[in-house]
Image (cartoon, rainbow, N blue to C red):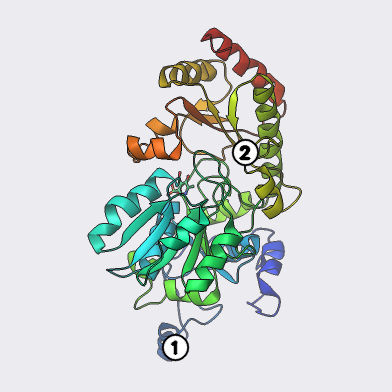
Amino acid sequence: MKKFDPSTGIHDYLVFGEFGDVNPSITDSSTFTFHNPEKMEEVFDHEIEGCFLYSRHWNPINKYLSNALARLEDTESAQVTSSGMGAISSTILDICSAGDEVISGRTVYGGTYALLKNFLPKLGITTKFTDIKNTAGVESLINDKTKIIYAESISNPLLEVTDIPALSAIAKKYGIKLIIDNTFSPMILSPSRLGADIVVHSMTKYINGSSDCVAGCICSSNDFIHTLTDINAGATMLLGPVLDSFRAASILKNLHTLHIRIKKHGENALFLATEFEKLGLKVFYPGLKSNKDHDLLKSLMNEGFGYGGMLALDVKSYENASRVMTRMQEEKVGYLAVSLGYFKTLFSSPGHSTSSEISEEEQQKMGLSDGLIRFSIGIDNDITLAFERIKKCLKEINFL
Ligand code: PLP
């Protein structure tokens, strides 16, 4: 039987498995045995590679998946969690204490916005929301209490691209942490290479890619992941957002097709965005040359993975959006559903769903129109069919 060998690294495990199986075995255990009490005490004192204590802390399959994610994001280490919000909340709570402040982009996922705006103030942690693209404005908000700059690599739902290197320079200047949520752009952007200290994901989305579970991850330095998992004070250890090991195993298998899926999502989204633009529609997609963030994305992205599968279309009113989404679902373009990264196309009206936690006033400041439809474009083999169907639906509601 092959034992853990740190010199070979996790990649060998992912390729060969422990028993010669191509997929690593699923950990079906909440607790682990020790040869003697002394060894158990040692593991309580400090983590020993290859030794496991209790599954809320670590277990082999969560370790495999975490190590694969660290490779994906090019960080020293990573930890998986039971949701994206579990990853985000644990990260913030590990860094901040009562009295501390966060500076966050205004155009973040509604749940993150609600956590920062409504929940964390109960613990004395407050947030200043700002236009994250205005880096001078971000810097002007920093004071002694600021601990975190928080942003999404490509923002939700307007798909604005964050200038990660510029934010990183500011964070480093003041000794604060830059957290980037890279949910919309795995493989396309590598925030840690661009200067982020911590990268979080909702793995519920592209990384898993089949909309059959909720999961998250935190990718960062060895030190930070050790802090999170510290038995006496770590946020993930003590708050307990542990990912179930059966789920970790299935996500790990899906992770291996991420590069192909991301390319196809991006290819299809670029096709649709280009066709929508030709029809004179107001479309938000950073892959379009006409998009204000196109050059920035080109300068930051990893070549060969496209510009992402998310696009937004403004059909001017909520009534238009509702009618066309209902028809698109009937025409089998995809599903009227929140979330993203699924192999089929999903669409929803962000102002009335995923961003509804954000007040109308803030939505206006963000430029979030009531008629905005957010699409997560699927990996359809023939996307021209979807385009013809969408065009038909837009004509039927007299929008074309
Ligand atoms: N970050 C982004 C960008 C999201 O879109 C979401 C969920 O929609 C989350 C975080 C939260 O993730 P989860 O639903 O897995 O908790």
Q: Quadrant of residue 391?
A: top right
Q: Which numbered mark, 2 or 1, is in the foreground of this view?
A: 2
Q: Could you tell me which quadrant the C terminus lies in? A: top right
**Which residue is the extreme one toward the bottom?**
38
Coordinates of residue 319 in the picture (x, y in percent): 41, 17
The residue positioned 51% from the left and 77% from the top of the image is 223
Coordinates of residue 89 in the picture (x, y in percent): 38, 59
Name the element at disc 2: loop
Residues at discs 2 and 1 in contact (Cβ within 8 Å): no
Disc 2 residue lies near ligand 1 with CB under 8 A:
no
Which is nearer the eye, 383 or 361?
Answer: 361
What is the number of the mark on residue 42?
A: 1
**Taking 222 as reference, is 104 left or right?**
left
Which is nearer the eye, 166 or 48?
Answer: 166
User: Along the polypeptide, which appears first: circle 2 or circle 1?
Assistant: 1
- What kind of residue is marked 2? Gly
Q: What residue is shown with label 2?
A: 309
Name the element at disc 1: helix
Mark 2: give few (<14), some (14-19) or many (20+) Cα within 10 Å. Answer: many
Q: Could you tell me which quadrant the N terminus lies in? A: bottom right
Position above or below: 91 against 316: below
**Which residue is the extreme one toward the left?**
122
